[in-house]
Amino acid sequence: MAGHGVKFLGVSVLAGVVLAGLALPAVGAIGLGAKNGVQNFNNIPDDFKTPTLDQASYIYDAKGNQIAKVYARDRTILTQDQMSPLSREAQVDIEDARFYQHGAVDPKGIARAIGKNASSDGASEGASTLTQQYVKNVFIEEAGDDPVAFKAATEKSLGRKIKELKYAIQLEKDLTKDQILTNYLNITFFNHQAYGIEAAAQRYFGKSDKDLTVAEAATLAGMVQNPTAYDPLLHPKAAQNRRDTVIDKMLEYKHITPEQAKEAKATQLSSDLHYQDPQNGCITAGNGEGFFCDYVKRVVESNPAFGSSAADRTKLWTQGGLKIYTTLDPDKQAAANSAVTSQVYASDPVAAASTMIKPGTGEILAMAQSRPYGLDATKHQTVVNLNVGTAMGGGNGFQPGSTFKAIVAAAAIDGGTQLSQSYPSPAKMPYPQMSTCAGTWKNTKGETVSNDSPSESGPFMMPEAMARSINTYFVSLEADTGLCAVKQMANKLGIKTKASGAALQEVPSMTLGVEEMSPLDMAGVYASFASRGVHCDPIAIKSVTGIDGKQLPVPQANCQQAMQQSTADSINTLLKGVTEKSGTGAALNLSDNRPIAGKTGTADNRMAAWFDGYTPDLVDVTWLGGPDSSIPMDRNITIGGKHFYDTDGVYGANGPGPIWQQAMNQAVAGTPINQFTLVPNAPSPTASTDTPPPNPAQNPAQNPNPGQNPNPGDPNNPNPGGNPPATNAGLITTAPPAAPSAPSVPNPPPGGGTIGGGFSLPPGMIGGTGPGKPGKPGHH
């Protein structure tokens, strides 16, 4: 084509195009322009390709409402049929009226421009056709944020103009005029981060391009020549004059009637404008949805399903024109957001977070917290998502307290332990010997564990121990079950690591919830109970449509049976008992009296409090505490206008519990009431166990392998209890004997917690620490 191009164009025409396009005086330049231009023109390869333009991505909730729009360049591509004829006609009339009559160049336009530029009045005029302008815009688009490439794409040079011309000729052969005009209107910049006619229509007039009036279409068409000089916000008078010029051109070329022209010019531009500020990113999401949006962003940026490299995934998020349909239920999100923000103020020293999951699906239905999503610390905003772990934009998590006891119970029951299993459960006792995945932990330092109150002394069976959250019972149960089995059950329920990403430690105080978790972690666990043992990985994305309209692969929930159904039924029976009569969650029943189950939890020194509650159809885990785990809630503290006194303090039932109750009442209102599948004839959660228990505890000396007991009820097991009685009472553990210093640990980011109890690694306990410091974790 290179050889034929010059013959087609003619040397004089090529020179004219160069001169007119550069707005240079014609005198004395024709010879040089022609000579250099012909040589350069022939050397340019025929490799111009129409680029795939950056487009904004849209994130939608489960009902199709937009959560946010994200972009590097705010652009929404329109097809020809989707564009307003007015916009197309206005653009042609003002920029290139002979567009449909000439080829890549317009000889008449060249002659006019050369004459204008040779005049002595100092004015200049270009002769670039729309096709040439489109090619220039492609070069600018491809330059992106590279200043060197941008300068090369916009400089007034002979080489650039010839290159534009060569590619314009190629385009006129490859595309129809309508296609070129459509591409032009989609790529053009309109100032204020608006790229393309659709984004411009939305930015300046708050409507789609197809709905623009004559005056509005003329305003945007007039901006293209100089987006800043004719910006209706920055220079309204110049913009209105330019608009009227476009209207005159539209009338001249009979694209509008005289009446339409008169009406359009009579419209004051200031009254026509409905400017919309650029809305970019999760920070613009409303109703507390910014944290969920941020989570979706991190899913896209971290999951190989969306690209082989981190850079590719980030580019896809900001430039890929995705339509991301999420699991977020706007009604449940509103319920969770209202509850956390009304009961915990953004300015409070502590914060609250709430995550809702649909059991059996892994779908995250809500994700809210009391501090708003944003960057303005003076407004108590934060971008740290307290619902999730470090890798997904959260902190190091929080000690879950006694909510972890349900995992220990699941491991025990799945291994054969019965709900009737009884232990002496004194108010205070030494930690018994426990098996680990690597061997055996022995209590060589005399560490002890206590119940919350000196009056809490057994014997107890499992339902009452769970309802009253008896620490010593669950330490005994954990010892019989083995720390390895507990860890393995946690893994099956989605807890592979701590919220920080650090390995789970097989510590004897694991059952007391000393290892930091996120609300999302615990919501996944409790959703597994609600779905009768089926664990699903939490998911936030249902489907993604790419720029080409095709479906992209998305992360799957990978639902699997994590425990026997009968085990889950037993856990649901236990946790339903927590919300009945004298259970720690008895005050948290819902207004429609539908069945609920759940577990309260309180961390060391009341640094965090939890209620992990659910119905058969919905799980909501609510956390309350200091975002950096540094605010003890056992002193005088005011939260959401409510004062908690020294003698009371904050715990699972009176802090996060009412937040959960408010959110769930609103979330389940009007939905079907379904029942749990419960264990028939289970021991009562309020049973008095004054009589000797059916499975008396044995002396530790009688069992050489604590933690590796045969199943209770096994006829070959003469002493199924497996735990020593203990005496004395106390609210917290006694101070352990001096231990070697633990390795130094870097300070956690906001949202972090304590190290797993603060104990050093006992000799021979590979991959774990000592029992930790349970303090008063999670009784309430």
Image (cartoon, rainbow, N blue to C red):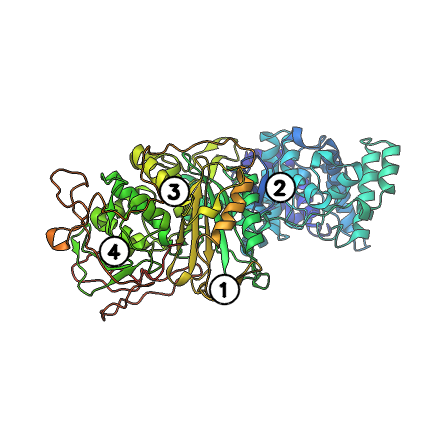
Tell me how far mark 3 sits from mark 2, CA to CA: 63 Å
Decide which of 235, 614 is in the foreground and name it: 614
The kind of secondary structure element at disc 1 is: loop
Give the mark nearer the N terminus: 1 vs 3.
Answer: 3
Kind of residue at badge 1:
Tyr
Kind of residue at badge 3:
Gly
Q: Position of residue 548 (x, y in %)?
A: 52, 32
Kind of residue at badge 4:
Pro
Q: Nearer the viewer, mark 1 or mark 2?
A: 1
The kind of secondary structure element at disc 2 is: helix
The kind of secondary structure element at disc 3 is: helix
Q: Where is mark 4, residue-wise?
A: 508
Above-or-below relation of 250 to 335? above
Tell me how far mark 4 sits from mark 1, CA to CA: 32 Å
Tell me how far mark 4 sits from mark 3, CA to CA: 25 Å
Query: Looking at the image, can residue 286 be seen?
Result: yes
Give the mark nearer the N terminus: 1 vs 2.
Answer: 2
Q: Please identify the residue farthest to the front as the structure is shown.
A: 691
Query: Looking at the image, can residue 321 be seen?
Result: no
Q: Where is mark 1, residue-wise?
A: 645
Kind of residue at badge 2:
Ile
Give the mark nearer the N terminus: 4 vs 2.
Answer: 2
Number of the label disc, if any, that sits on residue 388: none
Q: Where is mark 2, residue-wise?
A: 187
Residue visible at 50% across and 57% down?
A: 351
